[in-house]
Image (cartoon, coloured by chain):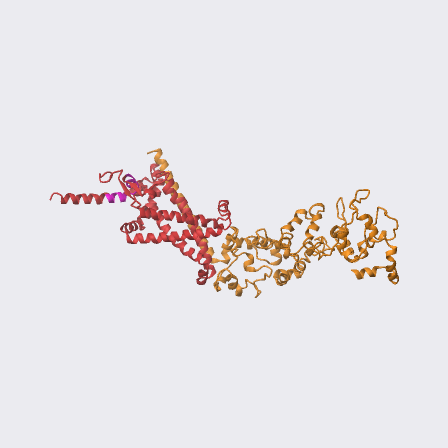
């Protein structure tokens, strides 16, 4: 930063000379503090004009020896104090031009629609005299403090597209809990996923959380998962640009991402089937991609599905047999449901599972065509039950009829 | 046969002794528990079952309870087999319980007797000559039953068959790893289906058939108390089990005659 700043000084040839005489020409910090160290100092409109020296001296700018007039540049030439009340806004861009440009291009730089267009400036997030670097634990943009900084606006004053409740969901997430409970400074904050200066609306293709970029964004931390996903049947189509395959947020939620062991997770053991079947029981997708349908129905009819419905988490759900990030088609030799791997997959729960596990159909949609034995057993039993119940009822009816007649004419 | 004077109307006979009542009670307990913990898996959408299994780990306890009840049922059946083989009364009961062709005829006769269609036709003058020639087809007389009528025999053998099917299929569902070591998956699937449908059959048989015959039937309403105290009166015996009644009367008569024959000496 310092090097860039030097470059910005006009007329480098006389820089040395200027620097030597500068203290004589420019108002010194002491001149400013003569008034601004007074806690009672207020503008005509009542705005507090006090500048906390200690806070400034320990700030990034104070540490770098930057003077008041370096930022409040229109005071450089002022000789008579007190100066005019109205000063020009500080131009951070005179040093931080790239960051300022990124901000102007971001959603924060564009006036929002609505009655009160808001343009966000540097100080809204970074503060003013007390600006600190993002690695300083007292900084407003330090990871542990950052959610508060963003939520200052986004919980109340400034509504985003999905509303404040959607923002608040982040505070339930595993990411936030890691920050809050463990102080895990590497956990994902707002900027980790949305970007800092270049934050953009999700529908903007350049947004880091847009469908196109979300895998890369999550993958920056979850490297192994990104790799598994890109090798999976979903990932392969994702790379081809399909908009139909699930990405991270489709299964894990957006802001309230929680561990799969958490009951609130969309991929909690008993809820997985509902997540997968959103697409896998969708007729349009089934036609387009040749998916097998009635997956949820056939799963629900099985013991696994029934037990799952009653909240049993130890039974198999979709992911238990198909995997999750690395789901592959059954013909893939690496697929968990490839016939060659079935005994290993089933063996995770059923110790010693052998080849017999593959001798039969798992997702039985039509028993008539797919599972003859079950079909025949069902038909036989239905006939027996139907026949028996009919006989019972006929006998009972005849018995009651006779008793009624007997009573009438004994 | 009406009143031989050998059996008083208020004389009490033991239709179910204590051992038999205990067996019956254990059967009620085990079957009831098995149904309560098993049927929810078939009727998963019923709210009443959902509310029973609402608490955490409910499904796990359901499974434990189902297996405990199954063991009780098996122990009960083993006990019953021992009782049947090793006691005199057990062997006699079993002989009485054996199905005969007469039971089919009884069922047929009782049904047409109750309906009374042929008597109605005869009264209206339809097929008069035919019915005069075959008076049996008028089903004028109610069939007479022995110690166990066809209804009771049917229920006994239904329980026997049902238990066999349920225990066999249930065992392999319990030991699914063993099952799939011995059978392919499609055979195991049949076990699961058979277990479910046999359960429904048993449930319906108990609810409709057994409940009618021992509770709702106007003759015993609100409930036959035999399963509690095991007692049946001479009057009830004559009305419901006339063949058994006559058998007892005859054996008493024989004993009386023998005693009379030996006395004058």
Quarter of the rendering occupied by the N terminus of chain B: top left
Q: Nearer the viewer, residue B161 or A27?
A: A27
The rendered magenta stretch, by its main secondary structure, is classed as: helix
Q: Is residue A298 left or right of residue A214?
A: left
Q: Is residue A14 left or right of residue A380?
A: right
First to last magenta residue range: B235-248
Q: Nearer the viewer, residue B34 or A11?
A: A11
- Asked whether A97 falls inside the magenta stretch, the response is no
User: Is residue B28 at least partly visible in the picture?
Assistant: yes
Q: Position of residue A82 (x, y in %)?
A: 85, 47
B124 up-or-down from A55: above or below: above
- Asked whether B242 falls inside the magenta stretch, the response is yes
Quarter assignment of residue A404:
top left
Q: Position of residue A179 (x, y in %)?
A: 64, 54
Q: Colour of chain B?
A: red
Q: Nearer the viewer, residue B139 or A84?
A: A84
Q: Colour of chain A?
A: orange
A368 up-or-down from A115: above or below: below
Q: Position of residue B125 (x, y in %)?
A: 34, 37
Label count reads 0
Q: Nearer the viewer, residue A159 or B103?
A: A159
Quarter of the rendering occupied by the C terminus of chain B: top left
Q: Is residue A18 left or right of residue A398?
A: right
User: Is residue A129 at least partly visible in the picture?
Assistant: no
Q: Position of residue A285 (x, y in %)?
A: 62, 55
């Amino acid at each position: 930063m310092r090097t860039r700043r030097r470059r910005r000084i006009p007329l480098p040839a006389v820089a040395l000379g200027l620097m030597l005489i500068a203290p004589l020409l420019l108002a010194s910090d002491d001149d400013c503090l003569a008034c601004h160290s007074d806690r009672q100092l207020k503008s005509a409109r009542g705005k507090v004009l006090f500048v906390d020296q200690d806070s400034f001296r320990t700030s990034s700018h104070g540490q770098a020896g930057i003077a008041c007039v370096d930022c409040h540049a229109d005071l450089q030439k002022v000789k008579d104090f007190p100066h005019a009340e109205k000063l020009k806004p500080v131009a951070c861009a005179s040093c931080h031009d790239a960051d300022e440009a990124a901000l102007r291009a971001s959603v924060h730089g564009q006036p929002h629609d609505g009655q009160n267009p808001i343009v966000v400036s540097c100080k809204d997030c970074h503060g003013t005299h007390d600006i600190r670097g993002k690695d300083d634990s007292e900084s407003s943009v330090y990871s542990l403090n950052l959610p508060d900084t963003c939520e200052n606006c986004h919980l109340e004053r400034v509504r985003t597209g999905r509303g404040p409740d959607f923002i608040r969901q982040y505070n339930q997430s595993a990411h936030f809990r890691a920050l809050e409970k463990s102080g895990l400074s590497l956990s994902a904050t707002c900027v980790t996923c949305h970007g800092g200066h270049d934050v953009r609306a999700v529908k903007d293709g350049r947004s880091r959380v847009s469908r196109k970029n979300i895998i890369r964004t999550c993958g920056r931390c979850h490297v192994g998962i990104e790799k598994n996903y890109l090798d999976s049947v979903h990932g392969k189509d994702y790379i081809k640009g399909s908009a139909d395959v699930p990405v991270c947020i489709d299964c894990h939620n957006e802001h309230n991402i929680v561990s799969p062991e958490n009951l609130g997770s969309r991929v909690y053991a008993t809820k997985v089937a509902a997540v997968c079947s959103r697409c896998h029981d969708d007729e349009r997708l089934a036609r387009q991609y040749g998916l097998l349908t009635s997956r949820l129905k056939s799963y629900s009819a099985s013991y696994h599905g029934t037990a799952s419905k009653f909240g049993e988490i130890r039974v198999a759900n979709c992911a238990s047999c198909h995997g999750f990030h690395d789901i592959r088609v059954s013909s893939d030799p690496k697929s968990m449901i490839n016939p060659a791997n079935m005994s290993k997959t089933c063996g995770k729960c059923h110790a010693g599972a052998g080849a017999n596990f593959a001798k039969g159909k798992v997702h039985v949609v039509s028993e008539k065509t797919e599972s003859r034995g079950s079909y025949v057993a069902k038909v036989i039993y239905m006939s027996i039950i139907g026949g028996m119940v009919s006989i019972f009822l006929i006998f009972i009816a005849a018995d009651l009829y006779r008793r009624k007649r007997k009573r009438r004419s004994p | 046969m009406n009143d031989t004077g050998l059996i008083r109307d208020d004389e009490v006979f033991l239709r179910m002794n204590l051992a038999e009542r205990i067996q019956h009670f254990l059967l009620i307990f085990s079957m009831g528990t098995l149904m309560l913990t098993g049927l929810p898996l078939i009727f998963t959408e019923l709210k009443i079952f959902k509310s029973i299994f609402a608490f955490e780990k409910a499904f796990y306890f359901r499974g434990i309870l189902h297996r405990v009840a199954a063991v009780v049922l098996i122990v009960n059946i083993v006990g019953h087999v021992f009782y049947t083989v090793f006691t005199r009364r057990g062997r006699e009961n079993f002989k009485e319980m054996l199905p005969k062709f007469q039971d089919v005829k009884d069922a047929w006769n009782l049904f047409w007797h109750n309906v009374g269609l042929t008597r109605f036709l005869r009264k209206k003058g339809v097929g008069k000559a035919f019915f005069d020639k075959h008076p049996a087809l008028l089903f004028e007389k109610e069939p007479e039953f022995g110690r166990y009528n066809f209804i009771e025999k049917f229920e006994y053998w239904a329980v026997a068959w049902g238990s066999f099917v349920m225990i066999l299929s249930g065992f392999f569902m319990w030991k699914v790893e063993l099952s799939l070591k011995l059978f392919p998956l499609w055979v195991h699937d049949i076990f699961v289906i058979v277990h479910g449908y046999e359960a429904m059959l048993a449930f319906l048989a108990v609810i409709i058939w057994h409940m009618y015959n021992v509770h709702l039937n106007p003759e015993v309403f609100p409930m036959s108390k035999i399963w509690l105290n095991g007692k049946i009166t001479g009057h009830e015996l004559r009305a419901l089990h006339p063949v058994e009644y006559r058998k007892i009367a005859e054996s008493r008569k024989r004993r009386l005659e023998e005693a009379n024959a030996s006395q004058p000496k």
